[in-house]
Image (cartoon, rainbow, N blue to C red):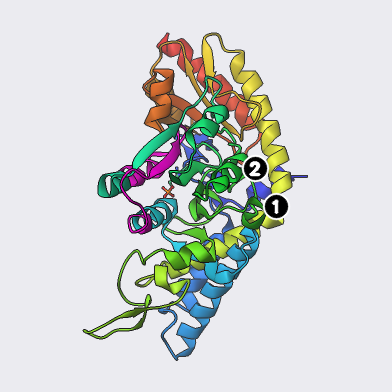
Amino acid sequence: MINVDKIREDFPILKRTVHGKPLVYFDNAATSQTPQVVIDTIVDYYSNYNANIHRGVHTLSQEATDKYEEARVKIQQHFNAKNTYEIILTSGTTHSINMIASGFSALLEKDDEIIVSALEHHSNIVPWQMLCEKTGAILKVIPMLEDGSLDIEAYHTIVNQKTKLVFCNHVSNALGTVNPIEEIIAKAHQFNAAVLIDGAQATPHIKPDVQALDVDFYVASAHKLCGPTGVGMLYGKEEWLEKLPPYQGGGEMIATVSFEKTTYAGLPHKFEAGTPNICGGIAFGTAIDYMNSVGFKNIANYEDELLKYGTEQLLKIEGLKIYGNTSNKTAVISFNVKEIHPYDIGAILDKLGIAVRTGHHCAQPIMDFYKIPGTVRASFSFYNTKEEIDVFVNGVKRAVRMLS
Ligand code: PMP
């Protein structure tokens, strides 16, 4: 059970006002808010043991290294990776995906096929298009259906012996759809294709078990699960990470360097060139501890309640259409009202202290599918309340009155 009043005390930002009104923060699918324990971790790092890691004999460097590596273990345990060195710390989901796309340019040949879903964020589309340009590989798309789910039957006909890689998000950030990744992974493996799952939007709601999923790569960003921006993770199966070449050259990722020959460090350092976001990595570990202390089952149950309530209340507004209203979705509601431009609704809601996102949500192909320029997107987190939903729904009604 969630004690939402107690949880809200953990988030200092929730006490602020915007344009003189209490903040209603419904832009959680863009980034989540930060609890005090994570803020304290950041302050503690810069106040007490700020130092570069892995190469210092002095005490501060050792303390920072220990905390950074403890965070890696927390991430490993959270995602149930078999080995700590299968967790690469990155600057976020986008960085993680680009790392794999770049590595596969060494493994793909002309006319190999790679498969993307129609529900992807641009960061899980563009790197693969760039990879196809470089290698001559062909990009195929799993189509979507009107209810915002994937046409999984079509996927079964697209995947074949030429398929080398399949990538799909676990949850769509634009619509909230939960994709059948178990089925996608199992089918790809019948053809020995690797699978990358983009967990950026799933990880705030679901605790993935990468071994049970048997997924080859799983990527996520800390800032979506109560951690700081600029840090994220890449899980890769050891055999794949060994096979892929390093992404960047530099310090930290080498074993020996000479002008005749350089040898690379082992995992995970082979993929971690340069000074990382040390403080961010440590705070990512704290954020994972915090989320687990709330409990992912509690989070999912409570957010489902908010989703159901918000959906019911919004649908009472005449002319309001929700996109992607599947039965299997997380707490994201993407909608439009009549012909009103989503930006206009968002701007009026802001004046009422309500933060929502408007636009294409970095998923233009989904907007093209529905033949719309964008949507208003309200996304709930476990620190939101039904009372806030009431304020939001009244705000939408007011905006519609003003704009009709
Ligand atoms: N994929 C999905 C599904 C996302 O929701 C996001 C963030 N909106 C990203 C990828 C990109 O994440 P980041 O900007 O943290 O790299």
* Residue stretch rendered in magenta on the structure: 103-129
| Front one among 197 and 293 | 197
Mark 1–mark 2 CB contact (< 8 Å) = yes
Question: Measured from the top left, where is residue 266 in percent x and y?
Answer: 45, 76
- Residue 315, given in percent of the width and then of the height, sits at 60, 15
Kind of residue at disc 1: Val
Counting the numbered discs, the total is 2
Q: Residue furthest right?
A: 1
Seen as rendered, the residue at the extreme bottom is 57
- Magenta span has 111? yes
For image coordinates 56% across by 21% down, the residue present is 147
Please, what is the three-letter code of the amino acid marked with disc 2? Phe
Residue at screen point 54% across, 25% down? 148
Residue 280 seen anywhere in this rendered image of the structure: no
Q: Is 10 in the magenta?
A: no
Question: In the picture provided, is 73 more to the left or to the right than 365?
Answer: right
Marker disc for residue 294: 1
- Which residue is depicted at the point 56% across and 42% down? 170
Secondary structure of residue under mark 1: helix
Which of the marked residues, 1 or 2, is nearer the chain's N terminus?
1
Q: Which residue lies furthest to the left in this view?
A: 259
Of residues 286 and 233, the one nearer the viewer is 233
**Image location (x, y in percent) of residue 348:** 42, 24
Q: Regarding ligand 1, which quadrant of the image does it lie in?
A: top left
Q: What is the crowding at mark 1: few (fewer than 14 residues within 10 Å), some, or many (at least 20)? A: some
323 on left or right of 340: right
Which quarter of the figure is the N terminus placed in? top right
Mark-to-mark CA distance, 1 and 2: 9 Å
Name the residue tied to disc 2: 382
Q: For the point 61% across and 37% down, which residue is it?
A: 180
Query: In what element is the residue under mark 2?
Result: loop
